[in-house]
Each structure stands twice: as structure tokens, then as C-alpha cells.
Image (cartoon, rainbow, N blue to C red):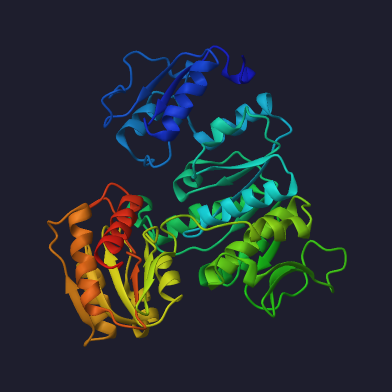
């Protein structure tokens, strides 16, 4: 089956053999086009560009995460091969296979997966034939042919840096803080990638409770007059905004009379009333309202939603001590949201910082933290930042040679000795996990297993 006239007679290269790359390879193969997959780190894929390729007849589709200055990408450009991201490729294919399908999207440093899953929960409650995809679970290319009317797409900074073509019905910008500086080269480049989403939509919801987005809000509006811009935040909303009134999420944006407000959900009906979760809920509700979903369905969808594992997950509440797994807090901004949710914290932190600074986190949260247990490669960054703010802080450093379950058994043993009634033991590492674990999920499972084994009675 044709996927578009511009692709007829073309050969394809898929760059990257991960989840997205394999999905692209399967899709292109199923539609009868010649395709090869290239990944220098995967033994099942080719390591190099095939010799003698015709650049005019070849299209390369790149998986997220590949740097634009990677030698293989630069070689493709030298050979005049057209290079597309998965998102741009899917958008082009959509014109043939799913022309009436609507796309909405969101991005942010933190909260993307939770928010996009909230949107999907609202879809189910409202009867909308839609699905969450992108940087969560199902890939975009896999979602084109299943008859969905709407795709709710979670987009990472990597995907946005590569993509230029889609035009979304509505998008949400959740927050922007330091992350992936090692890939983008600077915070400014990272922020630019995130803000790119703003220009690819008819309507944009912007979280002005976030300092970076608040500073950029007016500039964004002026630079993109074609985009209808709406703010959301945790205060009483003005006309054209979504916000919070007496613990009720309300809409003054998608209403006939903006002097009035429509109730969307009670804060007490949400899985967590932590500030970051209220903002995620407002973003999800705003995207749903952009699709004309009724407030009653939004309330039902949010009420029926439950948070993912490893995201502020209560593992144990015993002897007045709470043990919380927020292993998905893989950068300082995410960890700060977790730290602001509790007082009297025994904090477990560390791993791979990916070029991020810990200074802002330390300044903002040091008063809540009573002890720190450090793990991982960049533990010293956290130690130095915390001691600058709180020189007498109790800090325990672990053996960097420990890995996996052995490491977490040691960490939980130390935390058990430090904690007493009224404390919260919080795993919110502020760092990626790959130096000592295979993933943030394995890190969280190792922690929760150790808590159940060594603490629960």
C-alpha cells in the first residue's frame, strides 16, 4: 500500500534500532518499500551507510536521541539523502493513511507522561476514539493505522529538535528546566527545542507558573500571531485562562462568556493535589477542552486516573515514616517537585546529572531536607550544592562500586537508621540511572523491594 506519492520509488534507511527504529522498520517493510536499519551499537543492524546509495532516491528516518552533528547524520547529508524525524515522516504519511486524524501534543521537562496519560483517561471517559503515543509506550508511526480519530502525542526535546512539519490542533507547554544539556549543548538550545512546539500549533496552552515560560509568554505571543495562546496556572484565572479557585480546577478559556468559569474537577478528586500534579491536570483538561470535550467527562477522566509507578509512589507508611519512590525524577526540576511535596526528608539522590546544575534545587529545598544519602557518578555535584546552602547537613556517601539491588539494600539500611517518626524517606534522584541501573524503573523496583524486605514488618 502506498504511503504517499512522494515516497514512490524511494529506498529507506532507518537510523537507530531502538523502539522507534524497530517500529519504523516494521511499518516501512509492511508497506512494501526497501528499507535497511542502521545502528552502530546494535549487532542486529548494519553499522554503516550502505555503499553506493543514491542520495536522490533515499530517505533516512531518524529515531529520537541521535545528535544532529553525529558523523553518520553528517555523512547522509553529504550524500544528499533527505533526513526526516519519525514525527515529520509520520505527519507526511498521515496525509495518505489518516487524513482526518487530529493531532494534539505536549512537551515539558517534567510531567509529560503523567499529563498525556491523563488526556487518554479523559478520552476514555468521553468516548473519544483517541490514544496517547509518542515518547510514551506506543510510537506515533504505530498509531496511524488503527483508526484513531485523535493522537495525543508526548514529545521530547530530541523529537522536537528534529521536527518541523506537523500542525497540531492544540499543544501544551508544561515547564522548562535544566535537562539533557549534554545533548543540546546549552540550556538555551534545550529551551528553544521545547518552545518550537508553540509554533507548530493552532492553539497553545502555556504554564505561566513556570518561571521560564512566564518570562517568555509575551514574547511567544508576539512572535506567533497565528497561534491562539492561553495561560494556565495555580491562581484565580483571568479571562482566557485556566486555573484554580478554592481547590477547584476551572476553565475561563473555552467558554462562551469569559467572565464566567466552568468547573473542571475538584482538586481532592485527583490522584495527588501536589502543585505539579494540579498543573498537569490543568494542561490535560485544557487540551481536552480544545477538542470540545465536555467538563463532566474531564472530571470523570481525571477522577479515574492513577499515577504511574515510580512517580511519588507510596511504598510503605509505617511507624510514622513514609517511604516514597519517585525514581522517575531524573533531573533537578522533577526532584524539586517531589521535595516540595514533603517536609523532614531523608533524601536519596544521585546518578548521572547529564550536565545539569544542582544549585537551584539546593537553594529552594535545603530547609526541607534533614539528611542526604548519595549514590552514583555525579553524587559530588549534589553534595557540594547542598553543603553550600546547609553546611551542617548530614550526608552519607555510598560506595560507587555498588550496583542494582545490592546498592539499594545498603541505601535502605542507612535510611532506616536515620529515619524516625515524622520523616519521609524519598527516592527522587535528580539524575538519570544508567550508571548503576538499567533504567529508572529498575532503580525504583530495587528501592521498593528493599523497603518491603528490610523495613516492612
Would residue 343 be found to the left or right of residue 265 on screen? Answer: left
- Which of 445/238 is in front? 445
Residue 436 shown left or right of residue 347 in the figure: left
- Of 185 and 16, which appears nearest the observer? 16
Percent position of residue 70, x then y: 32, 38
Res. 296 in view: yes
Picture coordinates of residue 175 (x, y %)?
52, 63
Please tell me which residue is depicted at 58% across the width and 62% down the height of the picture: 280
Based on the displayed image, in which of its 4 quarters is residue 245 positioned?
Answer: bottom right
Find residue 8 and report its horizontal and vertical position in percent.
58, 14
Question: Which residue corresponds to the image point at 32% horizontal and 68% vertical from the top-left?
Answer: 357
Residue sitting at 67 percent across and 62 percent down?
A: 221
Return the residue found at the far bottom: 392
The percent coordinates of residue 200 (x first, y second) are 63, 47
Q: Residue furthest front?
A: 457
- In this rendering, is residue 36 above or below 64? above
Residue 257 quadrant = bottom right
| Residue 224 appears in the picture as rendered | no
Q: Residue furthest right?
A: 257
Amino acid at each position: 500500500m502506498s504511503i504517499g506519492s512522494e515516497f514512490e520509488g524511494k529506498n529507506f534507511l532507518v537510523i537507530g534500532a531502538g523502539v522507534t527504529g524497530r517500529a519504523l522498520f516494521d511499518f516501512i517493510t509492511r508497506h512494501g518499500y526497501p528499507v535497511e536499519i542502521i545502528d552502530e551499537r546494535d549487532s542486529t543492524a548494519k553499522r554503516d551507510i550502505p555503499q553506493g546509495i543514491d542520495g536522490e532516491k533515499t530517505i533516512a528516518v531518524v529515531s529520537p536521541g541521535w545528535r544532529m552533528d553525529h558523523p553518520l547524520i553528517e555523512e547522509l547529508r553529504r550524500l544528499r539523502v533527505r533526513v526526516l524525524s519519525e514525527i515529520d515522516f509520520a505527519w507526511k504519511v498521515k496525509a495518505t493513511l489518516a487524513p482526518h486524524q487530529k493531532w494534539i501534543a505536549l512537551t515539558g521537562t517534567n510531567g509529560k507522561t503523567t499529563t498525556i496519560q491523563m488526556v487518554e483517561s479523559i478520552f476514555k471517559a468521553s468516548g473519544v476514539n483517541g490514544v496517547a503515543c509518542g515518547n510514551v509506550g506506543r510510537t506515533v508511526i504505530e498509531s496511524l493505522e488503527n483508526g484513531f480519530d485523535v493522537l495525543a502525542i508526548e514529545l521530547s526535546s530530541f523529537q522536537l529538535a528534529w521536527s518541523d512539519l506537523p500542525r497540531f490542533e492544540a499543544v501544551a507547554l508544561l515547564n522548562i528546566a535544566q535537562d539533557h544539556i549534554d545533548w543540546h549543548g546549552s540550556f538555551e538550545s534545550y529551551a528553544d527545542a521545547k518552545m518550537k512546539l508553540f509554533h507548530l500549533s493552532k492553539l497553545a496552552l502555556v504554564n505561566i507558573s513556570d518561571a521560564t515560560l512566564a518570562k517568555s509568554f509575551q514574547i511567544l505571543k508576539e512572535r506567533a500571531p497565528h497561534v491562539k495562546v492561553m495561560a494556565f496556572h495555580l491562581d484565580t484565572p483571568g479571562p482566557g485562562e485556566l486555573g484554580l479557585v478554592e481547590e477547584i480546577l476551572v476553565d475561563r478559556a473555552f467558554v462562551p462568556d469569559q467572565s464566567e468559569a466552568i468547573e473542571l474537577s475538584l482538586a481532592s478528586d485527583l490522584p495527588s493535589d501536589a502543585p505539579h500534579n494540579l498543573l498537569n491536570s490543568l494542561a490535560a483538561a485544557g487540551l481536552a477542552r480544545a477538542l470540545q470535550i465536555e467538563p463532566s467527562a474531564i472530571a470523570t477522566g481525571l477522577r479515574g486516573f492513577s499515577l504511574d509507578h515510580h512517580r511519588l509512589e507510596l511504598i510503605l507508611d509505617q511507624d510514622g515514616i513514609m517511604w516514597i519512590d519517585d525514581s522517575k525524577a531524573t533531573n533537578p526540576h522533577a526532584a524539586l517537585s517531589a521535595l516540595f511535596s514533603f517536609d523532614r526528608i531523608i533524601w536519596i539522590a544521585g546518578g548521572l546529572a547529564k550536565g545539569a546544575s544542582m544549585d537551584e534545587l539546593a537553594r529552594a529545598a535545603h530547609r526541607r531536607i534533614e539528611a542526604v544519602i548519595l549514590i552514583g557518578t555525579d553524587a559530588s555535584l549534589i553534595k557540594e550544592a547542598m553543603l553550600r546552602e546547609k553546611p551542617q547537613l548530614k550526608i552519607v556517601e555510598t560506595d560507587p562500586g555498588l550496583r542494582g539491588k545490592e546498592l539499594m539494600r545498603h541505601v535502605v539500611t542507612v535510611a532506616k537508621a536515620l529515619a524516625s517518626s515524622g520523616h519521609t524517606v524519598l527516592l527522587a534522584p535528580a539524575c538519570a540511572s544508567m550508571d548503576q541501573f538499567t533504567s529508572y524503573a529498575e532503580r525504583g523496583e530495587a528501592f521498593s523491594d528493599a523497603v518491603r524486605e528490610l523495613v516492612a514488618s
